[in-house]
Image (spheres, coloured by chain):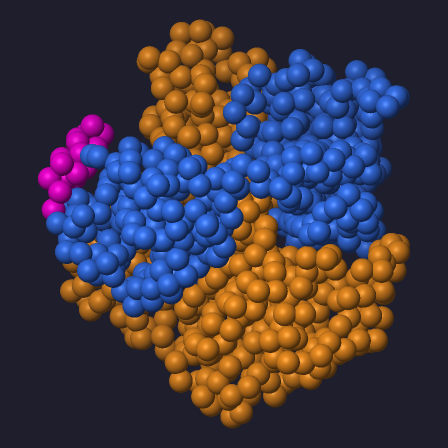
Chain colours: A blue, B orange
Amino acid sequence: MKVAKELFDPEKSGAILEGMRVELITTGSELLLGQVVNSHPGYLSSRLATMGLDLARQTAVPDGQEAIGQVLGEAWGRGGVIIVTGGLGPTSDDITREVVAGFLGKPLEDRPEIEKKILGYFEKRGLVAPESVKAQAKVPRGMEVIPNDGGTAPGLFWEEKGKMLVVLPGPPRELAPMFEKYVEPRLRSYARPAEGMRVVRVTGIGESAVQERCEGELRRLGFSAVGYCARPGQVDVRLRGAEVKLLEAGVKRLREILGAAVYGEGTETMEEVVVRLARGAGVKLATAESCTGGLVASRITDVAGASEVFLGGWVTYSNEAKMRDLGVSAESLAQYGAVSGAVAGEMAMGARRRAGADWAVSVTGIAGPGGGNANKSVGLVYLGIAGSEGVETIEKKLVPERKVFKAMASQVALDLLRNKLLPQLLPTSEV
Amino acid sequence: MKVAKELFDPEKSGAILEGMRVELITTGSELLLGQVVNSHPGYLSSRLATMGLDLARQTAVPDGQEAIGQVLGEAWGRGGVIIVTGGLGPTSDDITREVVAGFLGKPLEDRPEIEKKILGYFEKRGLVAPESVKAQAKVPRGMEVIPNDGGTAPGLFWEEKGKMLVVLPGPPRELAPMFEKYVEPRLRSYARPAEGMRVVRVTGIGESAVQERCEGELRRLGFSAVGYCARPGQVDVRLRGAEVKLLEAGVKRLREILGAAVYGEGTETMEEVVVRLARGAGVKLATAESCTGGLVASRITDVAGASEVFLGGWVTYSNEAKMRDLGVSAESLAQYGAVSGAVAGEMAMGARRRAGADWAVSVTGIAGPGGGNANKSVGLVYLGIAGSEGVETIEKKLVPERKVFKAMASQVALDLLRNKLLPQLLPTSEV
């Protein structure tokens, strides 16, 4: 399958160079029926951001000739690059191919070489291809094909003066490599490397407090618009500007003002920072979880290479498990209760000792909706961090909603590890 | 704060009753910069679906007077209910309040009773309110206020003939209770209870195979359009129709054709099914995880009330941990390797015995990107399920991408538990 190299040739499409505008149309009724989270806007915009390109708008529409055709027409009128996702699959509700063909006025043609590749895909897996997959071998006349190396539905390319159309399949694991391998190289010729964005990620401070402490300083430096985004256990501060020096100065100032509350930059997650720091320090980690139920361990093990630093963890959801596996004392459980600083401390120490880890973190709290009482309400959590010099525990009152609570508590736990793993700062101007 | 009861009075807005169309506009640059996943479309559309209302379109635009104003104008022209989220916060990039005021031509007015409530919110938490939060006490003249019991930014309501505008804050934990408590009761008067949707959730079979086995039968029953949505380890089949009897018949037929591959209906997750079945059967569960790193345990403990059935789990990321905590034999590790059926079986048996559980599930595999070799490639996984009658193990080859792999492997693990927990089917017409 040939991919049109000339398709995104800047010489050919000068009109697009001015005011490069990218729109995303995500199709699929499931996106509008509360069944799935639409991950395409996040993924594609973060890829575009690396090229200094913005997503100007994202629209989701249900499957259906009318809905897709209407929104495609509107976006087409605004011009620029239009990325359409979804509806290229083999099932009867996959109609994007037909809608695009109709919109551009191009008949669908069978492409035997694509059908052959699709059949080969099934054969390689020892499966018989259902008849329905052959619909994916149809291409609107004259459109270029974007190969799909991880699935059966190829993507489609089209361009005319001032407009560019990229059609990609919906499954993220097919879309992502196709975008990175075949679409990005062409978009890169339009990238604006001088226009940059820096994101500073902050934990442990609320959104208004972050702004109050930083915005004046950032404006003095010359930033006209600063963006903030709050999520459970995290605030992102976004700086944009054309000058790399200004961006650097902004990030430096934020780090000075907020200190260790800045845990990372860009899209780096807290767990990536923890694994990176542990690797750098050559230390091993362990976890002991009650209310977070394995989420801290799961976040650590989301990071490629986590096995170099993570020995393992315990999910001790019962008192018996806390005593048996982590050596928590029956006395502490009786005297202070499972949700207490004493038990958090013993959990962390037990996990560290038993795993043979350098650092172990523990979490015990009340995730709700049940389990709270007059003294200890839903949202209360104790965390412990154990190292060679002993154990420290903290108490937090978090949002009393099960999933938000788990997310926040896991963030605090990872942040405890991070703070212990940070290289010792020099008490000089280095800081 | 008064909430306009009359606002969604069907008598008053008869025009809307015909062809109730709901659009969602999500604002916030972070949604278009790859920093956060936009959870509003999923949440709001699932709430709307319970009322038989569809989300006809969802649009995301960055912060900014022009972008928000433009898309609001377009949606306004199409009519119906328009829900706008985000940009009501205290920081400088929160401008939705101003844009809405400008669009409707209504000046912003200070509302002292809202300011008092906001200051009380901070006081109750022992915090000093930053000056910036006072902006949230401004309301476009004549607009109704939707109380925010979980945060500081109130929402806004507006209605005129044939159009309805609902403005809600961006943080999901503030938006959700506001929508359910104050917006839903008004929308319910427009609900179409006769128009229904049923979703059947299938695991272990691919999307094309599901269609091939079911679509003909469903069409014969009278369904004109059937929807499919594939995700890691899962395919959702969507049936829509005006007749409850037809929907019931469709679901029944799907269950007959697909058997135990149907794990649930609606929005019920695999982990919810597992916890529900374990509760019903009065049995206790445990987990032993290597490559999934705690994700199976974390999914189980996402379910409220999981503590009634879940005793705990082990994340044994090293060989030492597998031997020490689960009693895996050094011989099996040496002879078959950590990623093997033998080790998966010993892990499950060890976890069951040690936790004193009725059922224990185990996972050991290669999540990648490293760790694969010529004999055992990334994506290979062994799972074990141990009960009173012994242990069974299975081998699977999953997608070799770390996070997708973890999601799929955890789904298979939960499905193993589910199959053991299913009530014994009677070999009669009951089935």
- Residue A74 visible to an observer of this rendering: yes
> Residue at left 79%, top 62%?
B133
Give B364 or A307, whichever is nearer the viewer.
Answer: A307
Res A381 quadrant in image: top right
Res A319 quadrant in image: top right
> Residue at left 71%, top 69%?
B154
Q: Position of residue A29 (x, y in %)?
A: 36, 60
> Residue at left 53%, top 92%?
B12
Q: Position of residue A347 (x, y in %)?
A: 73, 28
- Residue A26 visible to an observer of this rendering: no
Q: Position of residue B94 (x, y in %)?
A: 68, 60
Report whether A36 appears left or right of B307.
Answer: left
Give B135 or A78, whichever is nearer the viewer.
Answer: A78
Q: In this view, which residue lies farthest toward the bottom? A: B11
Report whether A243 appears left or right of B350.
Answer: right
| Residue B362 on the magenta segment | no
Quadrant where the C terminus of chain A is found in the figure: top right
Res B223 quadrant in image: bottom left
Give B177 or A32, whichever is nearer the viewer.
Answer: A32
Magenta part of the protein: which range?
A110-130
Q: Position of residue B364 (x, y in %)?
A: 45, 24
Q: What secondary structure characterizes most of the magenta part?
A: helix
Quadrant where the N terminus of chain A is found in the figure: top left
Report whether B80 appears left or right of A200.
Answer: left
> Residue at left 57%, top 45%?
B35
| Residue A126 on the magenta segment | yes
Image: B141 above or below B50: below
